[in-house]
């Protein structure tokens, strides 16, 4: 499958999953580096190219290595790199790197291995809904398979050694993507963000920053990577996510019991604009689709499925629109295409 | 909000937690640049811990410290907050130990170990994990469990010593 082939489908992590109402997906990321080898940010072009080749060779040890697509950043256009970024398969940082940097992605997009990002290897495992344990099992297995052919930089005291000391130890970043419109509408999101931040976890908007996050999408992840086992880190994150979900549920209950007419109005207006607008900027689309998504959760949109909205959340981004159109578009042309894409989707409903 | 170092309006606001104490820093553009903060790039926790909290003058004489494997100089590492290679952890151990403790509230790995690592590493890690469990047991006054864990730790250390003697 080529990169364009990705457009025709959605990532396997957007299939149905546990707790998929508030939780979009769960992600595990492992940072690994090769022994006695300069980290990518400080290595020469030659060394980085060597690392890319070494990782590719080692990848033959992965049982289903044939199902992984591989792309080098210096062989992709800016648009293609943006497409991978919008699909959560690479980081912004990898997209901006060149020699020796690349990514391996399996066909259902649930596993990705970035090479020569900040660290030599960044393994990613994505699962639909709240399922950190499964995501960990998959990442752990891939890590074990790779390790058969690679010697990792490791110290018995500091664990896996990483380019940035904030990742040292397990090299594990576990994160959960949450949709929290209830907490945003009741303006209770700020205290929740503050409380979660205080117990060593990070909360950030998936698109945009802090409590101003577009689409009411948030990512909660662990900050501490050393001195705890992987199981402890995951269990701790999951417990907090469950608590945040409880707060979201209560916020929605309160909205529906005290301000039901306003909730109906909010969802109905979003639908009205999305069904009729001729120009639609990304941020506006994310916010309005968020309202529709909440409407589905509350049973106000009987003909729509949550996952259809989740797929639109990705397809309305600039690189996706341009790849689907097959040409580079100006911002205004994108706004027209975006509005059209959403209108067409709603017409079928 | 005024800059901490002069009367100008502060444009950079940082919150840092050092040894469990929250400290706020407000700087004007000029002083932010002087402290080596690039206003246009996001600041990582490492940058803050490495750059602002240290008594810079006392360690200025160590600025020339360079990693023998990769050639990363100490001031370069302080600027980016990123190390040059795995060996840098040994080279810059003195200042890293403090920063790592502040970030992670721990200095000992107890997680996964690569299969290639030897028996010794596994044993050390097991002891570290048992010790952590023992501290937790003592904290909740479960002395019976703490005593059992103490015996297990002793046993592990004994086995480790025997292994050491056994390997050439």
Image (tube, coloured by chain):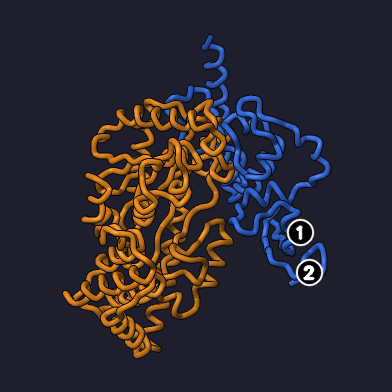
Chain colours: A orange, B blue
Q: Position of residue A227 (x, y in %)?
A: 56, 42
Callout 2: residue from which chain? B
Q: Residue at (28%, 43%) from the top-left corner?
A: A106
Left or right, B116 with respect to B59, comes to: left
Image vertical order of residue A125 relative to residue B21, above or below: above
Q: Which mark is residue A150?
A: none
Asked whether residue A238 is in view, the answer is yes
Image vertical order of residue A52 relative to residue A164, above or below: above
Asked whether residue B152 is in view, the answer is no
Q: Position of residue A298 (x, y in %)?
A: 29, 78
Callout 1 environment at 10 Å: few (<14), some (14 to 19), or many (20+)? Answer: some
| Depth check, front residue: A141 or B27 | B27
| Depth check, front residue: B158 or B47 | B47
Give yes or no for contact between labels 2 and 1 (Cβ–Cβ under 8 Å). Answer: yes
Q: Position of residue A24 (x, y in %)?
A: 34, 61
Q: Which mark is residue B8?
A: 2
């Amino acid at each position: 499958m080529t990169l364009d082939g990705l457009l025709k489908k959605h990532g396997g992590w957007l299939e149905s999953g546990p707790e998929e109402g508030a939780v979009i997906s769960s992600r595990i990321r492992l940072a690994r580096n090769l022994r006695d080898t300069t980290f990518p940010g400080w290595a020469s072009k030659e060394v980085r190219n060597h690392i890319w080749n070494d990782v590719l060779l080692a990848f033959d040890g992965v049982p289903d290595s044939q199902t992984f697509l591989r792309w080098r950043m210096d062989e992709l256009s800016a648009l293609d790199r943006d497409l991978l970024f919008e699909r959560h398969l690479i980081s912004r940082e990898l997209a901006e790197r060149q020699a020796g940097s690349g990514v391996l992605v399996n066909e259902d997009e649930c596993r990705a291995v970035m090479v020569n990002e900040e660290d030599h290897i960044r393994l990613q495992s994505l699962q639909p809904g709240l399922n950190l344990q499964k995501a960990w099992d998959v990442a752990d297995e891939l890590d074990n398979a790779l390790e058969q052919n690679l010697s990792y930089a490791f110290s018995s005291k500091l664990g896996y050694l990483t380019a940035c000391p904030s990742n040292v130890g397990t090299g594990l970043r576990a994160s959960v993507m949450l949709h929290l419109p209830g907490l945003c509408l009741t303006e209770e999101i700020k205290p929740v963000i503050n409380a979660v931040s205080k117990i060593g976890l990070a909360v950030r908007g998936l698109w945009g920053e802090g409590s101003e996050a577009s689409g009411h999408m948030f990512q909660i992840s662990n900050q501490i990577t050393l001195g705890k086992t992987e199981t402890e880190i995951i269990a701790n994150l999951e417990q907090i996510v469950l608590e945040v979900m409880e707060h979201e549920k209560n916020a929605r209950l309160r909205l529906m019991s005290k301000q039901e007419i306003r909730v109906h109005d909010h969802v109905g207006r979003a639908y009205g604009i999305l069904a009729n607008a001729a120009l639609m900027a990304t941020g506006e689309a994310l916010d309005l689709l968020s309202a529709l998504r909440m409407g589905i959760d509350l049973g106000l949109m009987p003909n729509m499925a949550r996952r259809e909205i989740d797929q639109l959340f990705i397809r309305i981004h600039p690189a996706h629109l341009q790849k689907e159109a097959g040409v580079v578009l100006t911002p205004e042309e994108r706004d027209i295409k975006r509005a059209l894409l959403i209108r067409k989707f709603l017409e079928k409903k | 909000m005024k800059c901490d170092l002069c009367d100008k309006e502060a444009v950079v606001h940082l919150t840092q937690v050092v040894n469990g104490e929250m400290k706020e820093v407000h700087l004007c553009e000029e002083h932010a640049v002087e402290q080596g903060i690039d206003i246009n790039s996001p600041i990582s926790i490492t940058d803050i811990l490495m750059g602002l909290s240290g008594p810079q003058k006392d360690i200025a004489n160590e600025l020339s410290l360079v990693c023998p494997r990769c050639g990363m100089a100490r001031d370069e590492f302080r600027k980016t907050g990123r190390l040059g290679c795995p060996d840098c952890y040994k080279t810059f151990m003195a200042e890293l130990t403090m920063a790592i403790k502040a970030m992670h509230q721990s200095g000992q790995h107890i997680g996964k170990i690569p299969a290639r690592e030897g028996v010794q590493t596994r044993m050390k890690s097991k002891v570290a994990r048992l010790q952590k469990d023992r501290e937790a047991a003592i904290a909740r006054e479960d002395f019976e469990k703490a005593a059992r864990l103490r015996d297990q730790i002793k046993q592990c250390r004994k086995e480790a010593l025997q292994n050491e003697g056994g390997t050439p």
